[in-house]
């Protein structure tokens, strides 16, 4: 660190906010995290962590803790949801993968990752964590930022603020004002169940430990084990024909059944075991470059909400956190640190946001489009990472992946 420590407030205690708190505290600063929920937590579903995320977790000092419960899948397999045939695969444990990426591809339960970050935050003497604090406003002077809360008239003064308050970020709304998030008209049903509840062909797939993506027309199903293989995570995603921005009555279970009705036996076998307790409409936003507003900076979904098709939203939030920690180690003034962080991160995050939309379109092709996709991918080998390597290799990585 270059000069005296700053006091930095983080708004939002999700994966992005907790990771940022850890990164900044490890760079020598004092951090206060304010989270609106009554308890810190995550939802009961899985998360894929590509090697760029594992590298970030290593830098944050929590990779070993995450690895203890995560699964390192041998393959990422794309299957045709209609025919049941394999389209393509990537080897995630072979020599080609290891020599190129160095860090593991992991799948984890969100609670396990969030819990590891929270435990590290609780142990760090420079981090203070508060729940039940909903930020309503952030008022800047040339010297500090004051956070206002819904629950109390007390203000929190800090030298700088990191807005990690997610997709519907209040601070982004105040600072950027680029309207509401964009609904893709797709919806997800997801959750992780004990692997022992899997039967038939599903039980067989679960034992492979691979990440399996069943791609079909305007729908897909993702499956993988989490928590040492004790739980099996499933995410069913489809486009609704009844999207209505003013109603919750679209993307219903009846539509889920209808959209997946023509799929192969393995997918239809899996569907009754997809969690139905909540539906998740899927949103993103168009990229922006103005992440920095004086002493306030955006991070994670608040900065770059993306569709989940490249499984990179949390991975990018972790990259943000590491980049921000480094910038605050190398610069005295928060404004300079934030400018350096944004210069490193905005273009890369924007590319991934944009390409996540494209990959969703490729995944959801129908008819001739799907036939051509399958033909084009048929000749790929499982060691060919050329199309995905840029996503899995962070900008500014000090140990860049060697080109084969
Ligand atoms: P959030 O997780 O939204 O956290 C924001 C926090 O801020 C919350 O705790 C919230 O309570 C708090 N908050 C909000 N407003 C306020 C306020 N005003 N005051 C105080 N606190 C506030 N990403 C991957 O990397 N891999 C995957 O496999 C993957 N799969 C996905 C599958 C689906 C179906 C979806 C929808 C997303 C997926 N993602 C994946 C994306 C990933 O979940 C998100 O990008 C990531 O969780 C964002 O973290 P965050 O901390 O930025 O935001």
Image (cartoon, helix red, strand yellow):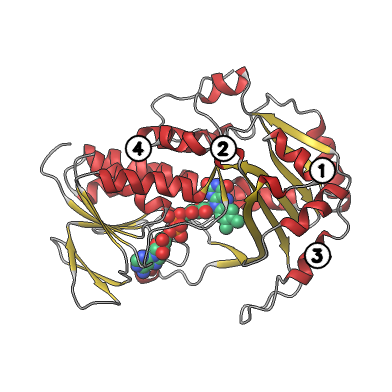
Q: Which residue is mark 3?
A: 257
| Near-viewer residue (245 or 295) | 245
Residue 143 to residue 242: above or below:
above
Give the alpha-carbon distance from disc 2 to disc 1, as whole Å: 20 Å
- Please say whether residue 312 is visible from this viewpoint: no
Relative image position of residue 245 (x, y in whole percent):
62, 78
> Looking at the rendering, in which quadrant would you find the N terminus?
top left
Residue in the image at 22% along x and 56% along y: 160
Mark sitting earlier along the chain (2/3) = 2
Q: Which residue is mark 4?
A: 60
Circle 1 SS class = helix
Q: Quadrant of residue 400?
A: top left
Rendered image: mark on residue 158: none
Is the C-beta separation of discs 1 and 4 under 8 Å?
no
| Residue lying at 59% horizontally and 17% vertically, measured from the top left | 404
Label 1 to label 4, Cα distance in Å?
39 Å
The part of the image, by quadrant, that contains residue 44 is bottom right
Q: Measure how far apart labels 3 and 4 are at the Cα level.
A: 42 Å
Residue 372, image x and y in percent? 85, 42
Cα separation, mark 2 vs mark 4, equals 22 Å
Query: Left or right: 400 with respect to 226?
Result: left
User: Which is more N-terminal, label 4 or label 1?
Assistant: 4
Q: Which residue position holds label 2? A: 228
Q: Residues within 10 Å of mark 4 (few under 14, many from 20)?
A: many
In this rendering, position of residue 370 left or right of residue 169: right
Q: Label 1 belongs to which residue?
A: 201
Q: CA distance from mark 2 to mark 3?
A: 30 Å
Chain-order first, disc 3 or disc 1: 1
Is residue 267 at all visible to an observer of this figure? yes
The picture quadrant where one finds residue 327 is top left
């Amino acid at each position: 660190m270059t000069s005296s420590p700053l006091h930095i407030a983080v708004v939002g205690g999700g994966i992005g906010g907790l990771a940022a708190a850890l990164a900044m505290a490890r760079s020598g600063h004092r951090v206060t995290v304010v989270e609106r929920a009554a308890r810190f937590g995550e939802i009961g579903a899985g998360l894929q962590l590509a090697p760029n995320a594992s590298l970030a977790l290593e830098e944050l000092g929590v990779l070993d803790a995450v690895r203890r419960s995560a699964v390192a899948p041998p393959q990422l397999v794309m299957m045709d949801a209609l025919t049941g045939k394999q389209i393509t695969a990537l080897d995630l444990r072979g020599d080609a993968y290891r020599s190129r990426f160095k860090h593991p591809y992991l799948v984890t339960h969100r609670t396990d990752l969030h819990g590891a970050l929270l435990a590290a935050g609780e142990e760090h003497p420079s981090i203070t964590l508060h729940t039940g604090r909903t930020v309503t406003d952030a008022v800047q002077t040339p010297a500090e930022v004051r956070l206002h809360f819904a629950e109390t008239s007390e203000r929190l003064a800090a030298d700088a603020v990191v807005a990690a308050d997610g997709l519907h970020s209040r601070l982004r709304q105040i600072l950027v004002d680029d309207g509401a998030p964009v609904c893709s008209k797709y919806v997800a049903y997801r959750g992780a169940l004990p692997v022992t509840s899997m039967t038939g062909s599903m039980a067989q797939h679960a034992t492979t430990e691979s990440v399996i993506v069943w791609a079909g027309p305007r729908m897909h199903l993702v499956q993988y084990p989490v928590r040492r293989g004790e739980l099996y995570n499933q995410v069913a995603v489809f486009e609704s024909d009844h999207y209505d921005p003013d109603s919750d009555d679209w993307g219903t279970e009846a539509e889920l059944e209808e959209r997946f009705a023509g799929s192969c036996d393995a997918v239809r076998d899996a569907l009754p075991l997809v969690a139905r307790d909540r539906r998740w409409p899927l949103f993103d936003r168009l990229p922006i470059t103005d992440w920095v507003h004086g002493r306030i900076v955006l991070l994670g979904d608040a900065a770059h909400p993306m569709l989940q098709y490249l499984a990179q939203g949390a991975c990018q939030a972790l990259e943000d956190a590491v980049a921000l920690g480094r910038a605050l180690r190398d610069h005295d003034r928060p404004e300079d640190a934030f400018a350096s962080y944004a210069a490193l991160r905005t273009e890369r995050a924007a590319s991934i946001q944009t390409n996540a939309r494209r990959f969703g379109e490729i995944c959801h092709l129908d008819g001739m489009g799907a036939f051509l996709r399958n033909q084009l991918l048929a000749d790929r080998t499982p060691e060919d990472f050329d199309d995905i390597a840029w996503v899995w290799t962070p900008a500014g990585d000090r140990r860049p992946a060697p080109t084969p």
